Image (cartoon, rainbow, N blue to C red):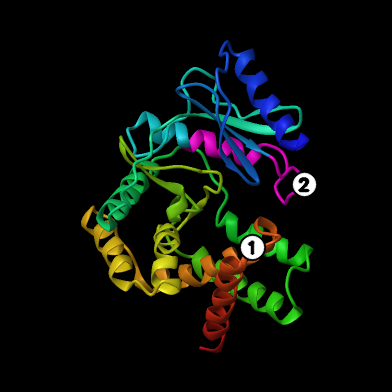
Amino acid sequence: MTSSIDSAIRAATETAMAHGIVPDRCDILQNSSTLVLRLTETLVARVVQDRDGPRQGTEWFARENVIAQHLTTRGAPVIPLHPDLPPGPHEHLGFPLNFWEFVTRVEAEPEPHGIGRTLQQCHAIMRDFPERLPKLAILTESLAILKDRDLFPQVIQQMLRDHLTTSIEMLSDCPHQPLHGDAHMGNLMNTTCGLLWTDWEDTFAGPVEWDVASVIWNARILEEDHATADAIVDAYRDAGGELDMAILEQCMIGRAAVMTAWYPILYPEPNQERQTRLHRRIEWLKAKARC
């Protein structure tokens, strides 16, 4: 266990103890840029380990907390913040962190109708969220990263900037509302309490088609599983959601550009599978640039 992980664990345990909770375990559930720890039967801590990355401070954590609270109190299908600690965001030993309730995962893969339905439920509840969120934040943030860092060969770098600029221009005029922002399958858990969305740190204001594009992108493009992607879209509509297919297509392009821009930051030493996925995204974006 590295000293960095030791320090992150210490930050989480000491923060919990400062609020009267004594950890009785330290189960590492995830160890990446964010460290996820189970500290008691019900308490899970998320600790940001990548303190030198593009995001500094706790502003984005604060947005995650307030949108999660809004969703939790209205019965949305989300993993809730832990009720025995202040929502925060907390910061200790230089680590931003927050605390969530532990949920038990089940092995069954989420069904497409449940994915579309629960996403639309979240969107409906977020619609009356009272606080302002930054518009198209993940797109503008990704564009800024590409301007500040040379992450790809120049021709690829410029293509990504062009796609992001076009997406921002086209999506700026669409109807906006609060979104998840990063609604991929890794942020949806099948649990004993049903399908629950998590990881709201990328929340921003934009068209609902962005979240739908995010959740169907891999199925539609990488896996060519059009039946699953179509079923998610149909379920979202059946639950009362409205989608503009032209906006959805632009969101698919913007989402691919965002994922590509962040790849060298999230996966500085990608395995062969991740390298293949990155290559396929870039080739797909090249084809879109020629259209």
Q: Considering the image in quadrants, where does the N terminus appear?
A: top right
For image coordinates 46% across by 22% down, the residue present is: 41
Write down the residue under mark 1: 263
Q: Is residue 66 magenta-colored? A: yes
Write down the residue under mark 2: 52
Query: What kind of element bears circle 2?
Result: loop
Q: Is residue 148 magenta-colored? A: no
Q: Residue furthest front?
A: 1
Count residues near mark 1 (Cα–Cα under 10 Å), then give few for <14, some for 14-19, many for 20+: some
Q: Which residue is at the front of the view, 226 or 72? A: 226
Per the model, the C-alpha gap separating discs 2 and 1 is: 16 Å
Query: What kind of element bears circle 1?
Result: helix
- Coordinates of residue 238 in the picture (x, y in percent): 21, 57
| Displayed quadrant of residue 280 | bottom right
Q: Amino acid at mark 2?
A: Asp
For image coordinates 64% across by 73% down, the residue present is: 160
Count residues near mark 2 (Cα–Cα under 10 Å), then give few for <14, some for 14-19, many for 20+: few
